[in-house]
Image (spheres, rainbow, N blue to C red):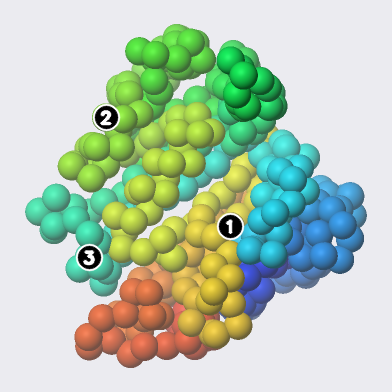
Amino acid sequence: MKNYRIVLLKGDGIGPEIVKEAVKVLDQAAKVYGFSISYEEALLGGIAITQTGKPLPEETVTACKASDAVLLGAVGGYQWDQLPGSLRPEAGLLGIRAALGLYANLRPARIFAPLRSASPLRENIIGDAMDILIVRELTGGIYFGQRGRVEKNGASAAYDTELYTVPEIERIVRTAFRVAQKRRKMLCSVDKANVLESSRLWRETVIRVAKEFPDVELSHMYVDNAAMQLVRNPGQFDVIVTSNLFGDILSDEASMLSGSIGMLPSASLSDSTLGLYEPIHGSAPDLAGQGIANPLATILSAAMLLKYSLGQERASREVERAVDQALLKARTADIWEEGCERVSTAQMGNLVAGLIDGKTA
């Protein structure tokens, strides 16, 4: 029996609660599909600051590098907001991405049929289906550029630098093209090439790399127009590839089209099969400990983990099917509507796990 090693970074706020439910689902998938999983817990974010004084202890990096995959809850909380940037929980998240070489962030935004009425868009705009995959560059750009404080014209000023090298752009764009080849063969590259020099280099590189993938239809869109088009006509998009900053913003916008940010998973991938999987929502400290958080984004992140890092594609599809079936029966508070049973975090996890029966082809 194949055994996989997964590191759990439960993090802060609702993180421990939602990771617990994802583990239930992973264990059931392993049981049904004939493999096993061993887990190791490590510290990241605010909890790591509290216990070690660092948002990313070296022991966490070592454990993650030795694993098959990493499952993350969420990081952050009010009690750490006053710390300098390098010591905030979010610095741990940026640090683990860099340490593991996780340069490609895949964020799907899709409508589950039972949640069509929860989308803020009218059904005639959503169409028969919305299934978008945003491929975001994760270890370059403005989040990792030079930054600082200066004096300008007698006033305090601050700067952050957007910088990309050609190899950084090439590798994320090739990842996006390969993903598009397995979907509807449409790739939209989003930039701000009418204003930013970094975007001009981005677009030039995308056009050149596109020659390697003649079977994929390539288009370009400025980021402000892309933000508008996501709510005007989301069905026009298949795969979107963009920079770290733009991807962060657009993927959060796209997530709300699906009805709840509590439904959106993500995968952060490297050149190896090692990946980090997390819901795109925050730590929601106001909800922590109440048992009302939606675990489905974390459970769907676990489905991506099964697919991309463990190679268990049947198990991955089965988890997605179980989530779809669970939504017909019950909802957590954030997506609840009349006619559905309102359930807790743990009850939703139990429901999804119980629906995994191996019937997916």
- In this rendering, the answer to whether 241 lies above or below 79 is above
Q: Position of residue 81 (x, y in %)?
A: 66, 56
- Mark 1 touches mark 2? (CB < 8 Å): no
**Mark 1 or mark 3: whose residue is earlier in sequence:** 3
Q: Nearer the viewer, residue 349 or 33?
A: 349
Label drawn at residue 225: 2
Q: Pick the quarter of the image with the C terminus.
A: bottom left
Kind of residue indicated by mark 1 = Glu
Q: Which residue is mark 1?
A: 278
Task: Assign a secondary structure to mark 2.
Answer: helix
Q: Position of residue 30 (x, y in %)?
A: 63, 72
Kind of residue indicated by mark 2 = Asn
Q: Which residue is mark 3?
A: 116
Q: CA distance from mark 1 to mark 2?
A: 28 Å
Q: For the point 26% across and 72% down, which residue is it? A: 114
Q: Pick the quarter of the image with the N terminus.
A: bottom right
Binning the other alpha carbons within 10 Å of mark 3 as few (below 14), some (14 to 19) or many (20 upward) gives: many
- Mark 2 touches mark 3? (CB < 8 Å): no
Task: Assign a secondary structure to mark 1.
Answer: strand
Disc 2 vs disc 3: which is toward the camera? 2
